[in-house]
């Protein structure tokens, strides 16, 4: 797991990386928002931790930007007074807000929660991609069936069986057969 750590002081940087290294997390450390933006463009991260009050900006806009561009969750550490103001915006982007002072256990727990959430999001995206491909396949097959029903007078069942038969004979997908049927009738 790779983490982006953004904190303005060496003490904060060390404290965060020390905790994450004990959890076998590789850390890239930045001290400014500009540096963190460049780092997040160069490579993906599984999680990020931003300690508010950076030199060049406060940090909550950076957190939202990184979460949206990298599609990962993160942790934003803030003073208790300001945390309530930014928490709802950050939560909507998958960012956990922790109030200072942060304990080692709360940081580890937040990283674990984000890791679980990221894994779930990856699963859902993969499933979505699979369903998108299936839907595209069904569109081609359905269009080919309609074309066969119009051109050859087949019923829907006959069209379906014809596409299945060609698929087995040619040892290729029904989608490929459907595309070939569509191409052959479009040429006429």
Image (spheres, rainbow, N blue to C red):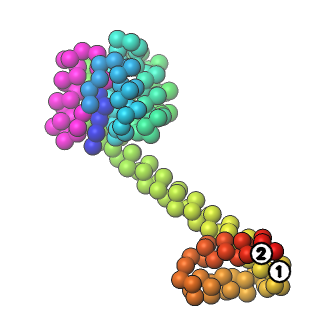
**Which of 140/108 is in front?**
140
Q: Quadrant of residue 22?
A: top left
Label 1 Cα neighbours within 10 Å, binned few <14 / some 14-19 / many ≥20: few
Circles 1, 2 touching at the beta carbon (< 8 Å): yes
Q: Rounded to the nearest whole Å, what is the CA distance between mark 1 and mark 2?
A: 8 Å
* Left or right: where 27 falls relative to 78: left
User: Residue 185: which disc?
Assistant: 2
Residue found at x 23% / y 19%: 12
**Disc marking residue 137:** none
Q: Does residue 70 belong to the magenta stretch?
A: no
Q: Is residue 157 above or below residue 54?
A: below
Point out residue 134 in the picture as x, y percentages from the top left corner.
Answer: 58, 66
For residue 151, the mark is 1
Picture coordinates of residue 55, whole percent (x, y): 34, 11
Q: In the image, residue 125 lies at what x, y percent?
A: 48, 52
Residue located at (19% from left, 40% from top): 23
For image coordinates 83% across by 80% down, the residue present is 151
68 horizontally vs 180: left or right: left
- Looking at the rendered image, the quarter that the N terminus falls into is top left
Q: Is residue 48 above or below residue 53?
A: below
Question: What range of the chain is rendered magenta?
Answer: 6-27
Tell me the residue at 78%/85% (across/down): 155
Mark before the other along the chain sequence, 1 or 2: 1
- Asked whether residue 100 is in view, the answer is no
The spot of residue 98 in percent (x, y) is 34, 26
Quarter of the figure that contains the C terminus: bottom right
Work out whether residue 148 can be spotted: yes
User: What is the secondary structure assignment of the residue under circle 1?
Assistant: helix
Within 10 Å of disc 2 (Cα), the crowding (few <14, some 14-19, many 20+) is: few
Q: Give the quarter of the image for residue 181.
A: bottom right
User: What kind of element bears circle 2?
Assistant: helix
């Amino acid at each position: 797991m790779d983490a982006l750590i953004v904190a303005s002081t060496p003490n904060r940087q060390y404290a965060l990386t020390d905790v994450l290294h004990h959890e076998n997390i590789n850390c890239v450390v930045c001290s400014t928002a500009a540096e963190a933006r460049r780092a997040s463009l160069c490579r993906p991260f599984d999680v990020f931790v931003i300690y508010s009050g950076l030199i060049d900006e406060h940090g909550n806009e950076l957190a939202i930007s990184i979460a949206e561009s990298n599609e990962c969750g993160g942790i934003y550490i803030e003073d208790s007074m300001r945390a309530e103001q930014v928490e709802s915006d950050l939560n909507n982007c998958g960012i956990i807000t922790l109030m200072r002072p942060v304990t080692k256990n709360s940081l580890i727990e937040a990283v674990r929660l984000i890791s679980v959430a990221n894994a779930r999001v990856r699963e859902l995206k993969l499933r979505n991609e699979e369903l998108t491909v299936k839907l595209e396949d069904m569109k081609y097959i359905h269009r080919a069936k309609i074309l066969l029903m119009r051109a050859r007078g087949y019923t829907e069942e006959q069209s379906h069986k014809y596409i299945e038969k060609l698929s087995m004979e040619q040892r290729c997908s029904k989608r490929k057969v459907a595309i070939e049927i569509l191409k052959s009738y479009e040429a006429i």
